[in-house]
Amino acid sequence: MNQEKKMMLLKIALMLIGLFFIFGIFPAMYFLPESWAWSPHQPEYEQMIIGVYATLGVFLLLAARNPMENRSLIWFTVWSSIVHGGIMLVQAVADVNERANLHGDIPALLLVGLILGLLMPRKQVS
């Protein structure tokens, strides 16, 4: 895949992920709590996570304008998503009460890291 096509796909991915972080996390936690929320229910923690991800979503939308000027933010999103998803994966394997997350936020987080990591250029694109 050439660099121009890859950059276009990165911009689209940043916009879609940003929009999901802003508008999709809350509905996912509300309508699919077994695979997107915590057990037992912890509304204060969930509100904090929704706020953090909505804020990140706004910045991902802004980064989509010029991804190369926002490399640090994008790489932070890649690695924090992989780490967050990886920790939750270990927790889901170790704790039967967390297994439903294997069908919700865990694959979503790992997918975000994978998609952005594969699309993000390793060097400055001229």
Image: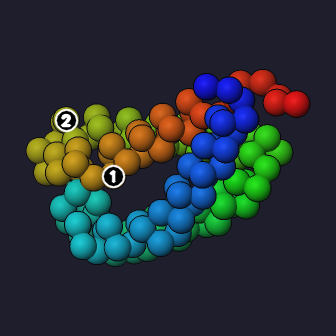
Closest to the observer, 109 or 38: 109
Say above or below: 69 vs 30: above
Q: Position of residue 12 (x, y in %)?
A: 60, 52
Count neighbours of disc 2 (C-alpha within 10 A) and say few if under 14, some if 14 to 19, many if 20 or more: few
Residue 26 in picture, x, y percent from top left: 39, 72
Q: Amino acid at mark 1?
A: Asp
Disc 2/disc 1 C-alpha distance (Å): 14 Å
Q: 119 or 53: nearer the eye?
A: 119
Image check: 100 left or right of 108?
A: left
Relative depth, front residue between 34 and 57: 57
- Residue 83, above or below 56: above
Seen in the image, is 121 located left or right of residue 88?
Answer: right
Q: Quadrant of the C terminus?
A: top right
Percent x, y of residue 114 = 48, 34
Residue 26 visible somewhere in the drawing: yes
Query: Which residue carries the number 2 mark?
Result: 93
Tag 2: residue type?
Answer: Val
Q: Which residue is mark 1?
A: 105
Q: Residue at 82% across / 30% down in the picture?
A: 125
